[in-house]
Amino acid sequence: MPSITRLTGNDFQSCVNALAALLLDAIDDDASLGFLAPVDQDTATRWWHSRRDAVDCGDLMVWAARGPDDAITGTVSLALERKANGRHRAEITKLIVHRAARGNGLARALLATAEHAAAGAAITLLLLDTQTASPAEGLYNNTGWTRYGIVPQYAADPDGILRNGSFYYKNLAERSPVPFGTVVATVPSYDGHPYRVEESPREGVTTAEGTLALAVHLPAVAGTGESDA
């Protein structure tokens, strides 16, 4: 069965090459993810390797979606804020779905996974940014996010062309609390099978046998769901 699983420690390390390939696929599709073309596998791999310390200390949570052949088809990250006056907030980053797996709600499932984990970690405010008028905006506009501003020529796309950036927030404190481990959504995978979402137990978070069942029976939104202008 396809799955969405949080990557920690050695699991993250073993997935770095696959995550790099996923990043390259998105960049090749003109996604604005902080890189200028051309980007090779070594560069993308080194970037993911540079995230290892943050993953190990818990400042960065990374999830990977796998298809029935166990290949990684999507990812999302949640970056926690460690400043004393900002520990109530976190940022959604690197929400990526492979081109072959798009159109079936996987971006929604990944986003919902990160949001639910944030709520379980007592995060009340989430932030993200994306390229203005990108397909990802459709996802955020339809999943309860609020765009609070557009910055002209905020970041360059992979071809080096400056694009506007859209900034979003989501106030989790306004949502009714949902016990961690509750089935809050269901989405089909690209081959019609539902995704199973697994979460490793963490200090201060009670899970149902270490498993977070997640999903949303919502119509698929066209586009990639990438965030990070």
Image: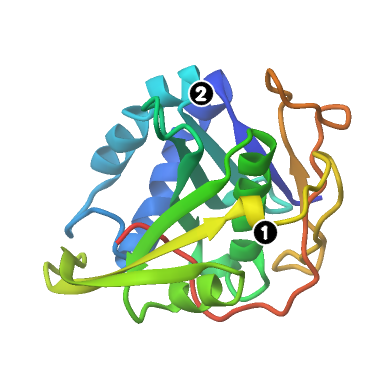
Going from N to C along the chain, the mark reached first, 1 or 2, is 2
**Residue type for callout 1:** Ala
Which residue bears the numbered disc 1? 109
Residue 184 position in % (x across, y down): 82, 56
Q: Quadrant of residue 41?
A: top left
Indicate the amino acid at tag 2.
Answer: Gly
Residue drawn at (59%, 56%), measured in percent from left and top?
A: 111
Vertical arrangement, residue 220 with respect to residue 87, above or below: below
Instruction: Decide if residue 177 is on the left or right side of residue 80.
Output: right
Comparing 205 with 212, the one in front is 205
Which residue matches tag 2? 58
Taking the image as drawn, is residue 29 in sight?
no
Q: Nearer the viewer, residue 120 or 6?
A: 120
Image side of residue 135 versus residue 44, left or right? right
Contact, CB < 8 Å: mark 1 with mark 2?
no
**Could you tell me residue 208's position as x and y percent?**
88, 32
Q: Residue at x 73, y 24 (%)?
A: 201
**Is residue 137 left or right of 164 when viewed as pictured?**
right
Residue 165 in picture, x, y percent from top left: 27, 69
